[in-house]
Amino acid sequence: MKKFSKLFSRRLGRGATEKDYSRHLVRETSPDVHQLSRRRTGLPANARTAPRSGLSLIIVDESHQPCDTCRAIDFPRLLDWQPGQPRPWIELSHTLADSECPFCTFFQALIGAVDGTDTFTPYLRIRLAFERLGVSEKHPIGKSVLIEVSTKTKSLPWGYIVRAAEPDAPGTQDHDSHDPGIDQSNTELGGEDDDDSHAKLNGHANKGSDQEPPLIRGRTISPFIDPALARSWFEYCQANHSDDPCSRKPSAAVGIRLIDCDKRSVITSDSLDQSEDIDYLALSYPRPEMNVQSADDWSCLPDDLPPLFADAISATRALGFRYLWIDQFCMPNPVSEPEEHRRQNERIGDIFQRANMTLVIAAGDSVDDGIPGVSVPREEQLSLKTETGTFTTSLLRPDLDIGGSKWAATGLSYQEGVFSRRRLVFTPLQTYFQCNTFHCHESISIPLQYTGDLNLGRAFPASVPMQPGSFKTHIAQYMYKDYATESDRLEAFKGVLHRYSQLDVPVESILGLPLFHADEIKGQKLASQTDRLAIALGWMPDNGMTSEGYASPFEYQDTCPSWTWLSWRPRLNHNPNNNGFHFSLVEELPPIITDVCASPRMEIRVGFDDESVLPWEAESQAVLEAADHITFLRIKTLSFTMQLQKSSGVMSLVDSPFNKNTTTLIEAWCQSTKAENIPDGTHELPTLLISSRQRNGEAKGTATFIVSRRKDWHINDKLVRLGVLRATFQELTITDEENGGNGTAYMKGLESEGLEEEKPPPRY
């Protein structure tokens, strides 16, 4: 266990609702980190002798009495806290010692093993929902009781303690839980078909309980899921979010293949009546690489389906659906149907958005692992039964549970999670539902009409309209994903690229870089194709730098041209939360680009794998049609050269026109290229001016530079990008040579971030 100084800091979440969330895919900055890790739920068989029912329910009874300290605290009364009573801090240090006391057993299981180097004091605290879940005190569930274990300054990551819901208790149920679970042979949905059952199924308050305040209660997790609960989440969304993005389908599902789960065969949507209204689920699961069918004809599914696929079919039927999309069986074969495979791969976002719901398997490593709660029993959660009731733990917060899975780490799953309207996520601990409006999870029972305001650990970003300025957010999240092959990195992002190309003001792309539409580039002249590409080349994967100890967060992999982010990988152990991704001189909100243009007289030519070269300005459309074959750029622009000297392992930049911090940054870029491979001597760093902005009436303009080096530091090899810099300047003047040469340019008053003294102007 780490010391508490290294654990998560407490962050209040008051006022932050789901509607405010738009920053991360699976890493939410939520009010607290409350989670019960799977590593903490079990104890050795001989560690405690308190009575248990099942694996993790600890019972306090007459034959197993509390220790003297716990008896004096009176935990049954404390856990049954009522409004108006004092809210003391209860020190729990005594529970960390071996004891037969059932309360000590419970809290030590909750806190986990402590080694001799840890020095901290855990406390039990009574909290109210409005203090922790991002709602106001006047919210209907704002006064619900949550019990937490923390230190005086930090919240421990081990879950809330919540009173367990009692059967048919008013104000607590959110569905009719009489379904026997998913079974391979019985996949019909259970539950009564009457008005009361329907009201509960859809999450409405129970009839006759209007005067009872709504409550947050714990739900006991059974080894296998209750499909009626998951179905109630889906149906509540369907009935109550008709005006929200959850209910908006893209164009008809034309030409896609689907699994008929009743007949265990693969059909095409075109063969069904009213294909526009076809209901189906989609499957998103952990896999190392993009699937390639082993056969063209899947008219009948094989008898020996991998466990994950077999469980997905069973879950689909249990949830009341007949059709399921799985890439392994439903994507066209890329060998025999390359064009159709390409078309559907680009429209993968539409396939998942059109699905009524996506089954996300955030558990296991491959298709050989069954789905928790379907064929694989789930662990029982830690619970405590006292004379005043049963109390459960809320388990690992969903965004952390999902975010730590192999599914979330894999780049192939990114588009599938982002574009789905509704997701039912299976984790090793519980199921989690999130549509584009609200989220809920199995271990917490809340009337569904109140969940839209709560912050329970949202795992997916809120649905916001795709805008050109948000392109960078997708790249920032996607750059940290894992890939089995380099080709998968672009292929698994083409759904995002296609969706941006279909906007009202479309954003085309070239090897993953956005080409913002000319209408988005506001200025005194119509933006050229060269302007568009120059702006795209100014991508910057990190926002900050320090004068000491700077380490480049990304490293170049010679798999794609270095001028696209596709060829850069995050370094091992680099924290993605410390850095952002942006395009120089591009804003997030409209107008995103104002008075930005390419460097004066810039010319770009694009080279392909067959050594052919096309001029970008005149042949941009032809270039984009052959974009998968691009291998290099030839850029003619204003530039100057810096000198890097290395002697006896020491490197330094000579005559840099930039300030100390920026010079240190450039030296760090060079160090990041495996400094031991850089030979002693002087090496040139060609620095290219690619874009600038100088508005009328402003004394200073802003310029974007690409700093480059030679590949492998060989003087005659191709140029490789080191990084991008942004600096301000006062004036740019260009003098032509009389004999028709390239001429000379001067940039006066060059200042980079943090510069206090003026440097000599660079000569181009």
Image (tube, grey):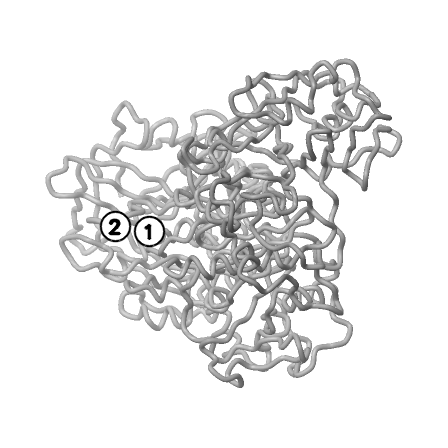
Residue 477, label in figure? none
Residue sitting at x 63%, y 35%: 163
The answer to which of 654 and 517 lies nearer the viewer is 517
- Residue 244 higher or lower than 460, as above or below: below
Q: CA distance from mark 2 to mark 1?
A: 8 Å
Q: Amino acid at mark 1?
A: Gly
Q: Please, what secondary structure does the residue beneath circle 1 have?
A: helix
The answer to which of 179 and 287 lies nearer the viewer is 179
**Number of residues whose C-alpha sits closer than 10 Å to that of mark 1, classed few (under 14), some (14–19) or many (20 or more):** some
Q: Amino acid at mark 2?
A: Pro
Residue sitting at x 50%, y 73%: 344
Report the side of 391 relative to 128 (left or right): right
Residue sitting at x 74%, y 45%: 379
Q: x and y percent of residue 646 in the render?
A: 50, 33
How many labels, in total?
2
Which is nearer the N-term, disc 2 or disc 1?
Answer: 1
Q: x and y percent of residue 485 in the render?
A: 60, 60
Is residue 726 at all visible to an observer of this figure? yes
- Quadrant where the N terminus lies? top right
- Residue 625 higher or lower than 690, as above or below: below
Q: x and y percent of residue 40 in the render?
A: 73, 34
Report the side of 734 relative to 673 (left or right): left
Q: What residue does disc 1 label?
A: 469
The reply to whether dot 2 and dot 1 touch (C-beta < 8 Å) is: yes
**Number of residues whose C-alpha sits closer than 10 Å to that of mark 2, classed few (under 14), some (14–19) or many (20 or more):** some
- Residue 276 higher or lower than 250, as above or below: below
Residue 590, label in figure? 2
Q: x and y percent of residue 640 in the render?
A: 31, 43
